[in-house]
Image (cartoon, rainbow, N blue to C red):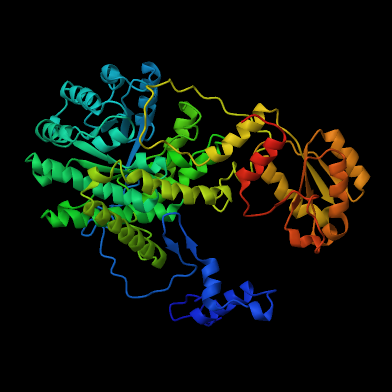
Amino acid sequence: MSVDEAGALPLAGDFPVPTDEQWYAEVLKVLNRGRPEDKQLSLEQGLSKLRTTTPDGLVIEPLYVRESEPRLGDAGVMPFTRGTRVRTGDPIAWDIRQLHEDPDVAETKKHIMADIERGATSLWLRVDEDAIKPEVLAEELSEIILDLAPVSVSSHEDQEAAAAAMAEVWANSGRPADKLVGNLGIDPFALSARSSKPVDLAPLAKWVTRARDEFPAARAITVDVLVYHEAGAGDVDEVAFAIATGIEYLRALEAANVPVQDVLDRITFRVSATADQFLTICKLRALRRLWARVTEECGVEADKRGALTHAVTSPRMFTRDDPYVNILRATTATFGASVGGADIITTLPFDQVVGLPNEFSRRIARNVQVVLAEESNIGRVNDPAGGSWYVESLTDQIAQAAWKRVQEIEAAGGFAQVFEAQLPTWIQQTVDKRTSLLATRKIPLTGVSMFPMRDEEPIQAKPRPRGIERDQKFPIRREAELFEKLRDRSAAAGRPAVFLAALGVRRDFGARLGFVENLESVAGLAIPTAEGTDPLAFQKAFKDSGAKVAVLCSSTKVYADHALPVARTLKEAGAKKVYLAGRDKELGGQDWHGIIDGFVFDGMDVPAHLNEILDTAEAAE
């Protein structure tokens, strides 16, 4: 080991630098291991097996290399890919904004004060009949110093009523009008998406000019594409819809003689942050780049082209079952939002989908941001992912694909023209692809589709009030619902049993048994198990279990000798269906038809298999 002149140890200095070709050769060696000579994979075939394509068409390569010298630029300047402002090293580098929507005035007031006193830097209040009513907004905020704590409102029913209530609170606050910061939450497309109301762009000019004239530091418009994300839109379409909506609003306000700079000073983009940290990072970077390009064409001064972004941990990714895993999902999403340069971040509580969050879950959500900021220091660096060949490539892909979608929208006449006619189709295309990946567990949901808790005790939460029935153009689709419905169906039927016949000894069946136990537990099924090779012993154990379905678990060698005899015996004992963990080729060419009813393997359609078992057990739909 050599030491350089400064006395430092170059730890890798004595090792040769591997070439790309050497890496490729080692990868191919692994992929071709055990393959016949005439079926060896070429380099491109091998890389294609390692290449991933997301549901909205983004290609993730197995290896990224420097293609050219990256032109990164700086944060706070065009094209704003690296952020709209320069982080100065303060621990809290973004606005920690927590959501409140409990209609109980006293409870919400208590939670608001706890947030502001213990780390949150601003508030987000949903103002609806099933949330905070407009007439109590002043009471909810009566103890808040409004020029120190920004407040934003949103509504699923009546955005103008929410905006009017917030404006009245500001006007009566006695605080300097030019110090009042927040957002009045006007977004006609999001309102229509969450209801059956037609799109009405008229309120835009009214509230932008009022904010400009009465509350010059406040914003009036929130381009909220979270509604499309919740319906299943992918990252590319989320960025494209945000940009296309912004363009539509610029046009509408130009027609109302509102100067473009007044609009840019009063618009915020609300997007999702998911547990895929890199997609979150790159989505935020791409959105800012595209909005800067749009505003450049509008003739806006270069330093005014930055997009203010509000990232919210994805409600779509949260699960009802094993909800504590949501803390990990939310932490990863919050990390991605910060690294991606979000100006505002909302971390939703882990029990968000179970009911109204309580003091504990709200504290955990708030502290996720506080700990990441003050202890992990992730906000002290500008664009820490910038320069990564993977991040730069993925940012470019999202930006180019989203811009292509924006051009398609513009060619059709603008966002208003495609809003009802084409958006649902585009979103459904992504939903179909994603549902297939969820069903086969290529997109795993920890605690739900993978490693479920067998005897989980549901957490208790305050029920959400029944709101107005809304005919949503874009219905909410939580990913875990695909599997939660199976668990509900099983519970209603008393958790039917699936008998697991473990053939041989532990070294034979251990791996397959563990796989099947986890798979059948996805639906909360009971899994009585017997071990050995004696068909009569399995027959007795099966009858005692009360099951109607059985799964054989073992290795190829054991299957060849024992699978079909045991399967026949189980059928004689009353089994309506017998499955084998593995593939038919493991039976050594024996005729299994009429004896084995199906196969359980990695990559199968899990909901289809579990529904078939529940159908066999005569569980009600």
Judge left or right: residue 367 versus residue 516: left
Position in image of residue 46 (x %, y %): 56, 73
Quarter where residue 217 is shown: top left
Q: Relative to 48, say whether 331 is above or below.
A: above
- Please name the residue shown 25% across and 38% down the image: 222
> Farthest front residue?
594
Quadrant assignment for the N terminus: bottom right
- Please name the residue shown 54% across and 34% down the image: 320
Residue 574 in view of the camera: yes
Position in image of residue 199 (x %, y %): 23, 35
Position in image of residue 84 (x %, y %): 24, 52
Q: Nearer the viewer, residue 378 or 229?
A: 229
- Please name the residue shown 23% across and 43% down the image: 416
Residue 378 in view of the camera: no
Q: Relative to 420, say whether 359 is above or below.
A: above
Q: Report how many numbered discs are placed on residues in the image.
A: 0
Q: Nearer the viewer, residue 217 or 102?
A: 102
Judge left or right: residue 423 versus residue 187: right
Quadrant assignment for the C terminus: top right
Q: Nearer the viewer, residue 81 or 415?
A: 415
Q: Nearer the viewer, residue 260 or 498?
A: 498
Position in image of residue 61 (x %, y %): 46, 67
